[in-house]
Image (tube, rainbow, N blue to C red):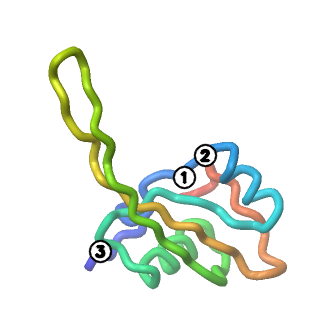
Amino acid sequence: MIKDAHTIIIRPVITEKTTQLKATSGVICFEVARCANKIEIKRAVEVLFKTKVAEVRTQSKPGKVRRVGKNSGKTKDWKKAFVRLRDGEKPIDYFEAA
């Protein structure tokens, strides 16, 4: 069980799709620790960004096989979380975390 919010939330995932989700429905996407559960993710976002979370959805992503010349390897597996804020909460600016 992870306690520190900075080790649970690794980084925001900024793509075209997540930017559109943030603008239309207030859903923010983060890369999170693989062992973190939804409750820990919710608490970490509330502590870091001082806002209330309505819902957390998680998705485990397998790593991809990559080749460099004749050497092949695999990128790490990772987990992402889609966090929806409560109605009336201020939107999260990615660079305001403490």
In the image, residue 44 above or below residue 39? above
Quarter containing the N terminus: bottom left
Q: CA distance from mark 2 to mark 1?
A: 6 Å
Tell which residue pokes out farthest to the left in this image. 71
Residue at label 1?
12
Q: CA distance from mark 1 to mark 3?
A: 19 Å
Query: Mark 1 belongs to which amino acid?
Result: Pro
Q: Position of residue 27 (x, y in %)?
A: 69, 66
Element class at badge 2: loop
Marked residue nearer the N-terminal end (1 or 3): 3
Element class at badge 3: loop
Identified at 68% across, 50% down, the residue is 17
Identified at 35% across, 63% down, the residue is 33
Query: Mark 2 belongs to which amino acid?
Result: Ile
User: Is 48 positioned to the left or the right of 5 in the image?
Assistant: right
Residue at label 3?
2
Front-lying residue, 46 or 86: 86
Tag of residue 31? none
Residue at label 2?
14
Front-lying residue, 61 or 15: 61
